[in-house]
Structures are given as C-alpha cells and as structure tokens.
Amino acid sequence: MDTLQVAKADLRQGWETPKGAVCSCCGQKVKMYRRQIYKAVAKKLITLYRLHQNLPQATHFHMNEIGTPISGGGDFSKLRYWGLIEARPETEDSTKKSDGFWRITDEGRVFVEGKGTVTKYCHVYNGVVRFRSGNQISIHDALAKESFNYPELMGYLI
C-alpha cells in the first residue's frame, strides 16, 4: 500500500499524460484536460452577447435561450475557464453546480467584439484551471477553425 505522498507523486507524473493516471489509494481516474475554444462554442458566446444587447435589463440567460440544451451544455460552460461567462449565483439548491443560467462578462464582450484575446489553452484539473498555454487567440481565430479535432481535444490519438 502506497503512502499518501507516494500516491500524490505518482498522480502528478501521470495526470498530464494522454491517458491520465489512476489513484493507487482510491482507484479514481485523474487527468488534466487541455481545453480550447472552438467554432461552435464561439458562436454560442456570440448568441449570448446578442441576447444581452437585445435585453440589457436581463442579468442571465438560460442555456435553452442560448441554443444549448442544459443536458449538453458542458462545452459552453467551459468558457468560464477564460472568464468569458459567469453562472448565476447559486440558488437554494446547493447540490447543483449551475441552474443553467449564464451571463457574458466584460471580458467576454471585449472578446466577442474582437477587441481582446485569450490564451489558446486552459489546462483544467478537477474543474480548476491549473495553468494556461499557447498563443493568444481572437474570436476570429476561434471561428476560423473548421472543426475541432477530437483526439486533440481529448489529448491523445485514437
């Protein structure tokens, strides 16, 4: 049986590999994910931007209004890693991560308007950005990408 320090060291060596690592203490898979903004998600951000322009009195919009069903909104919600969107503050149900309502941030507006850039990749572990890498990209760069590369998104070749 590994000590906790040995297990942590093993995980830190393996969590950035394409397959990730398995914790020798609990058996959970551990992986650092490299996320990027691709065309479909950039379009949804523009939709949210337009909703806020058309209804400036509204603070947040539901995923369905943005055109992303709440059950399939995971990629859209990852825009929070760049600070481009924010979830509505927690409701009474603390068991939910989000109730599906989002707002565009000032940084998101600047990005959509083509006046700002973000780092291409966010490296995420356990829902927290650990570091960023790559060049700065604009909304035009995100929209120009023809399609996302699934193996690149997942960090390995199939």
Image (cartoon, helix red, strand yellow):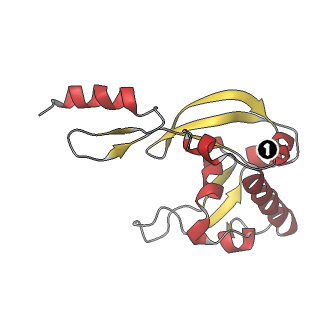
Residue 28 higher or lower than 89, as above or below? above
Q: Nearer the viewer, residue 147 or 80?
A: 147
Find numbered disc 1 in the image and state the secondary structure of the residue it sits on: helix
Disc 1 residue type (three-letter): Ala
Among all residues in the image, which is located at the extreme front? 158
- Name the quarter where the N terminus is drawn: top left
Residue 149 higher or lower than 45, as above or below? above
- Packing grade of label 1 (10 A; few <14, some 14-19, many >=20) is many
- Name the quarter where the C terminus is drawn: top right
Q: Which residue is mark 1?
A: 142
Residue 65 higher or lower than 47, as above or below? below
Which quadrant of the view contains residue 87? bottom right
**Residue 113 pos. (x, y %):** 88, 46
Who's the residue at 49% across and 69% down the image?
91
Q: Is residue 99 left or right of residue 6?
A: right
Who's the residue at 88% across and 42% down the image?
114
**Residue 140 pos. (x, y %):** 87, 43
